[in-house]
Amino acid sequence: MQVVREALDDAADAVDVHADVARDLQVYCRAFCAALDGHHRGEAEALFPRLRRQRPELAEAINSLLQDHSMIDHLLGGLRKVLDSSDSTSADVTQHLDGISAVMETHFRYEEKVLAAALDELADPDLDLPTALGPLADVR
C-alpha cells in the first residue's frame, strides 16, 4: 500500500492520477489483489478446514476471518473501480486505501491473536504450506 500512497503523493491532480499514477497503481493493485486472493483462497480451502477439524472451538473465529476475506475482496473491488474511473482523484484513491488498510490491519492482528498457537500446534503432515498460505507464504 505504501507504493500506492507514494505514487499518489507525487501526483499533482486528477489528470496525473490517471496519466502517471494509474499505470503503476493498476500493476501494483492487480498483483497485490491476485496475491491476496490466492492467500485467502488457500486459507479457505486448505488451512481453515484442517483447523476446524483439529480445533473446533475456533469455528467462530474462522467464520469471522472468512467474513473479513469477503469484506477485503469487496473493498479491493471498490479500489479497482476508482482506479478505472477517469473521474477519480487522488483523494478518492486514498479514501479506498485507508479503508482497505484499516480492515487488513485489524484482520491480520485478529488472525495472529486467535490462530497463532493453533497454527503452531497444527498436526497435519499432508498440509502443503505454500498451497495453504498462497502466494503470500514465506515458507523456507
Image (spheres, helix red, strand yellow):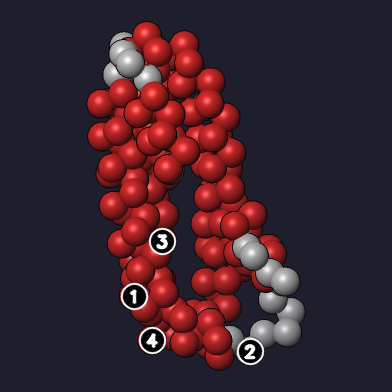
Q: Give, as a three-letter code, the residue at label 2.
A: Ala
Give the alpha-carbon distance from disc 3 to disc 2, as whole Å.
22 Å
Q: Is residue 100 above or below residue 25?
A: below
Task: Say which residue label 4 marks.
Answer: 57
Amino acid at pointer 1: Glu
| Nearer to the camera, 67 or 140 | 140
* Left or right of 32, for residue 109: left
> Where 34 falls versus 132 (above or below)?
above
Instruction: Kindly identify the residue that appears in the image at 57 percent across and 29 percent down.
Output: 27
Residue neighbourhood size for the residue with mark 3, other residues' Cα within 10 Å, grouped as few (<14), some (14–19), many (≥20):
some
Judged from the image, the secondary structure of the residue bearing numbered disc 3 is: helix
Q: Nearer the viewer, mark 4 or mark 2?
A: 2
- What residue did someone put label 1 on? 60
Mark 3 or mark 4: which comes first in sequence?
4
> Where's the C terminus, which quadrant?
bottom right
Q: Are marks 4 and 2 in contact (CB under 8 Å)?
A: no
**Labels 3 and 2: the sequence-earlier one:** 3
Q: Which mark is residue 66?
A: 3
Mark 2, residue position: 123
**Mark 3: which amino acid?**
Leu
Mark 1 in CB contact with mark 2 (< 8 angstroms): no
Q: Where is residue 93 drawn, in percent x and y?
A: 33, 29
Other residues around mark 1 within 10 Å, as few (<14) / some (14–19) / many (≥20): few
> Answer yes or no: do the residues labelled 3 and 2 have beta carbons within 8 Å?
no
